[in-house]
Image: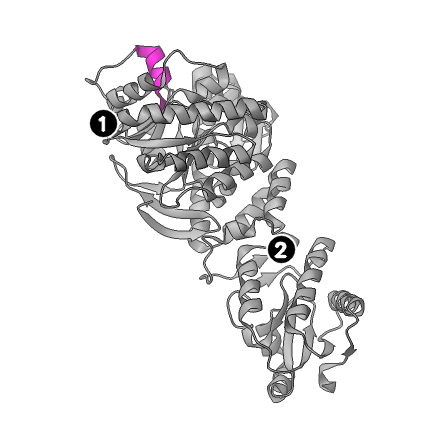
Amino acid sequence: MDEIISSDLHGRLGKIALPKGDVITPTLLPVIDPRKNLISAQDMKKKFDFNFVITSAYLYYKRYGMPDDSKSIHETLNFDGNIMMDSGAYQVLVYGDVDIDPIQSLQIQSNLKADVGVILDVPTPPEDTYTQAKQKVEETVRRIGLSLAHIEEHPETIWTLPIQGGKNTKLIEYYLNELKKKEYLSHFKFHALGSVAPIMSQYDFLSLFSMIKKSRESLPHNIPFHLFGAGHPMIFPFVVALGSDTFDSAAYILYAKENRYMTNTGTYHLHELYELPCNCEICSNWTPKELLDTDEDTRIRNIALHNLYASHAELKRIRVSLKDGNLWELLVRRSKAHPSLYKAFKHLANGSDIEYLEYATPITKQTGLKISGEDSFYRPEYSKGRKRMYNRYTPNNSKVIFLVSSGRNNPVELLNLRSELEDLIKSKTEEMDFAFLIPFFGLLPLELIETYPFSQYVFSAVLSEGLLDNLKPEIEKFLEIFQYKEIVLCPLDAWENTEILIKHIKEILIRKDASFKEKNFREL
């Protein structure tokens, strides 16, 4: 990456400097056929500002034969933006083999003056056994070794390291460790994860997320990370949050050929639609029936254009979310699009991968956080906040007052709204400590309430069983670390939420055999 403008989770809004102009990330690279396209690459640049596209070296070879260096791929496509060329590995994934070898693939890309090139690796589809996948991984390592001489002879091309191993993340780790041992990584200025298209077609998003995470965390972060074949806007926010800077797909046109209409929450078949739920130039001027009744090329072109509009709109939403620091909230909304996507998101949201997502999440942000419920309990801002609190806070007294409310107001609001409570706390801080119970965080010492993000939020005040289950170990951890000798529970209102929270704290204290009292704050 040449510039990082903003970051959140593991995603980054930035710039990649390429030979034909800077590329803003995250972005989609539409797949362009070397010969026939109903939407040209130049049209995509004019309509959507896509100045980075991808085409296939192998398909060029099949359409035109082995090229010399007299005509570039930019001239063939009549495109003045950046062009990445895939090696033919996708055709290997789909058909099992191609009739060119790795060096021929590289020569095609160099002769055509591709801006970004890829070596011909061996894909590892999800149906492979461990033994089969490992053999393919080792063959890809061998091919990289064979390709280095050509790569060194053609530094004008930015060469891409393909990542293989498939669903077995241990194989991805093995593969990358082998490359590090052989000191191959330094030859590549782009990294790209392959073999994901069949995994996405099976809606196996949990495996997809694990593959991206394992690849991303094992590679240097100054190199752009590409995801091959990730073309549906429904998953864009997630692959960005996990660290993908760029991704490509032909889905926009392949779906159009089957009358499939993309949205950011899923796909419709055109005949299912009563009307077109979009305001792009296609959907504003056509009805589903008109599209179905028109000639095939016009219908395919128009649906493909809409699919690109839908993809482009989602990219812009993601970039705005990265700049504003609320990418997590976009994930929460988008996770409801499909049960398999929600399952994969819940794996991210349960805290097990939270350190990975904390990587590029700033400690402070310009905006407050919207907390709907348990899905945000382990969001990185709060997991980082808990760690800082546990590591840095030191109690001032041996007695603590747990201030418990419904969650409708944050701690600063509670004190501003209740001057009597604020005055009492000020008069007692020499004798006792105070901690607010925040339902989606845990116990927070009074001294930290104005620190981001502990009062910079809006909370739904919905106490689900999942949220309460997450809350219990955080209360227990607070008690274990700070070892208060005297505990007083102080409900601040009579809302049902407050009663539920008081009940849960009591159960924890009784189980730990800790002595405590319950008082109204006026009795302190």
Left or right, 73 with respect to 347, comes to: left
Which callout, 1 or 2, points at the residue further toward the start of the chain? 1
On residue 153, the disc is 1
Question: Magenta residues, as a range?
Answer: 55-65
**Which of the two discs, 1 and 2, sits closer to the camera?**
1
On residue 355, the disc is none
Pointer 2: what residue?
Answer: 372
Query: Which kind of residue does numbered mark 1 sit on?
Result: Glu
Look at the picture and state if 375 lies above or below 19: below
**Residue 427: horizontal and vertical position, in percent?**
61, 89
- Residue under the image location 51 percent in, 50 percent down: 357
Look at the picture and state if 65 lies above or below 252: above
The colour style of the image is one colour
Residue 282 in sight in this render: no
**Residue 237: horizontal and vertical position, in percent?**
50, 42
For the residue pair 259 and 420, the one nearer the viewer reads as: 420
Q: Is residue 59 magenta?
A: yes
Q: CA distance from mark 1 to mark 2?
A: 55 Å
- Residue under the image location 66 percent in, 63 percent down: 474
**Which residue of the protein is positioned furthest toward the left in this rendering?**
70
- Residue under the image location 43 percent in, 19 percent down: 298
Q: Quadrant of residue 88?
A: top left
Category of crowding for the residue at label 2, using alpha-carbon neighbours closer than 10 angstroms: few (below 14), some (14–19), many (at least 20): some
**Residue 92: horizontal and vertical position, in percent?**
46, 18
Query: Which kind of residue does numbered mark 2 sit on?
Result: Ser
Which image quadrant: the N terminus?
top left
- Residue under the image location 61 percent in, 88 percent down: 430
For the residue pair 221 and 522, the one nearer the viewer reads as: 221
Q: Are the residues flagged by discs 1 and 2 in contact, CB closer than 8 Å?
A: no
Which image quadrant: the C terminus?
bottom right
